[in-house]
Amino acid sequence: MNKLNFLTAGIPLRTEPKDYENAFKVLDEMNLDGIELEFVHGVRMSPASQNTVKKASEKFVITAHGPYYINLNSKEQEKIDASVVRILDTALMAGKVGAYSITYHAAFYMGNDKKIVFDRIVKQTQRIIEVIESEGINVWIRPETTGKNTQWGDLDEVIALSKEFKQILPCVDFSHLHARTGGKLNSYEDFCMILERIGSELGQNALDNFHGHLAGIAYSDKGEKHHLDLEKSDMNYKDLLKALKKFDVKGALVCESPNIEEDCKLIKEFYLMI
């Protein structure tokens, strides 16, 4: 991509009626760059909506978030198989509508050793990549950094998985990293460290084709509790945006605050002023 784009996580709240055609009108009016399709409760989209999004993808950046019901480390094989299908369904729909990237929460540790969980996720990801390649689906597949210590997905893990497959890159949720570390990873130096690691370990391509999430966040010593508006949280979004500009990061930054379009506009306008 040629710049950093600012996306809302789902249809903007002010959209009336709440459909994709009107959503893109709102994004255009607010000078925002795109939308993350929220398939968190299942991959469903009518043919008419698919056509609308596909046409809009010529102007706007489209990403997609897979269902929450994914656990590639489940104790039950049928749940693992269902999780693989949900990721593939997300990728297939993303390919149909011209999306750039998909993301998902890959797994829970379930009390297992991290190395064991990683190896299991590699095995299941191999299944996913084989289908995607055979179907010719041209979207980035991205495990997301997660917000709780019970979830697989710290920065080390998503970088390591990305090294295993050409079509895998991280989705870096900066708010999740802040929450799962109990309030750390929230300074300009921290953000620069994260971006430096991605660039040095995965190559410049990973910074030129970035996918990240940002929101205010409430957390405890166990990690993420829930999202907040940016100004009602301690999330240091201004220094994050300064770091993203310093590293000339290009791609998609998705705003997941409860007031999605307002905070999305806030961060875009601040970024453009830096």
Image (tube, rainbow, N blue to C red):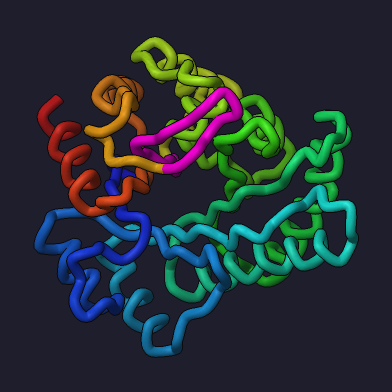
- Report if residue 107 lies within the magenta region: no
Q: Which residues are magenta?
A: 209-226
- Where residue 53 sits, quadrant-wise, is bottom left
Residue 61 in percent (x, y) is at 33, 58
Left or right of 215 in this view: 97? right
Res. 251 in view: yes
Residue, x 30% and y 76% (percent of image)? 20
Residue 194 in percent (x, y) is at 49, 21
| Location of the C terminus (image quadrant) | top left
Residue, x 73% and y 43% (percent of image)? 108
Which residue is at the front of the view, 269 or 215? 215
Left or right of 99 in this view: 44? right
- Report if residue 212 lies within the magenta region: yes
Residue, x 22% and y 33% (percent of image)? 231
Residue 113 in percent (x, y) is at 86, 29
169 w.r.t. 178: above or below: below
Which residue is at the front of the view, 219 or 66? 219
Residue, x 74% and y 59% (percent of image)? 128
Q: Which residue is situated farthest in the top direction here?
A: 189
